[in-house]
Amino acid sequence: MKRFLFVAVASLLVLGACKSLDSIPSSIPLGFVTVQMSDAPSTHRTSPTAYFVDATNVSIPNSGQNADTCAEIGYPGSQVVSPLAQIDAGTPLVFATTLDTAQLTPSAADANGYIFYRLPTGDSLRIVPGSTSRITIPGVSNGFHAFNFTFTNADSLKIQPLQASPDSVHDLPVTWNPQNGASVVLQLEFGATPSSINTQIFCQFTDNGSHAVQASLANAWRTAAARRVHAYRFLTTFNNDGTDEVVVVSTYGTDNTVILP
């Protein structure tokens, strides 16, 4: 899913546009779990993934650390994957939401050589945004050890209508429903035509319910011929048992923000 490039890449230990990064100072078996959700007419669904690496001095996303900043960058952006040695975690993993339970098993290596644990092709789980889920990892003696814990998922996100009338003086106010411990990413995307959008104002905010995009950046979007908005909330959870560590990156994305003329 192209619009989740930030989270997908951050979870692959690649420095992208995000400035909220934590670091692990020494080699440790590290498991990454991603849980993606988006707007749905009724029941929300997700297809979680997981992978496991031997991590040394890597950078990982942390929703609790924020720069509260915006920058104009290319769309959709480019990243370079930094390969890490993968380790076995046993099979299957068990992923449980408050509504469903399913097994994740290793898939074929992707284009970057990563082997992800996934649901069967086309499968998904029912999930309630903001609720808890649980991951159970069987583990192996010479890789990632047995591990299980419960975490909170990102809650649903609704950005209030954005005022897009040209304005060279005022900042662009942004308001939304907040979630404690999370971060909100706002992407104001624009270009000459809807089919040639090639620039974005990429913002990351502390998830406190309100912020503003400075006028000098917002006006490039306000005055563009073609405009659109993508936003997502991401919430990270860290759990270290002294031997291994699991990081969960849970996201909720929306493309339904209203743009006022």
Image: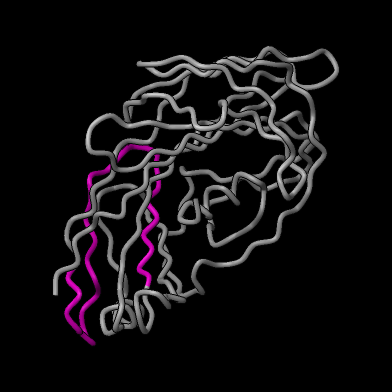
Residue furthest left in the image: 261
Residue located at (52% from left, 54% from top): 6
Residue located at (43% from left, 32% from top): 46
Model colouring: one colour
Residue located at (51% from left, 74% from top): 74
Q: Quadrant of residue 100?
A: top left
Q: Is residue 241 above or below residue 67?
A: above
Picture quarter with the C terminus: bottom left
Q: Quadrant of residue 215?
A: bottom left
**Residue toward you, 249 or 229:** 229
Percent across and percent down for residue 106 are: 69, 27
Q: Is residue 257 above or below residue 226?
A: above
Percent across and percent down for residue 119 are: 56, 26
Q: Is residue 189 above or below residue 94?
A: below
- Tally the numbered discs: 0
**Residue toward you, 214 or 166:** 166
Residue 164 covered by magenta stretch: yes
Residue located at (48% from left, 51% from top): 4
Q: Bounds of the magenta span?
A: 163-189
Percent across and percent down for residue 33 are: 57, 32
Residue furthest bottom in the image: 168
Q: Is residue 255 above or below residue 214?
A: above
Residue 89 covered by magenta stretch: no
Residue furthest right in the image: 142
Percent across and percent down for residue 80 are: 70, 60
**Residue toward you, 95 or 172:** 95
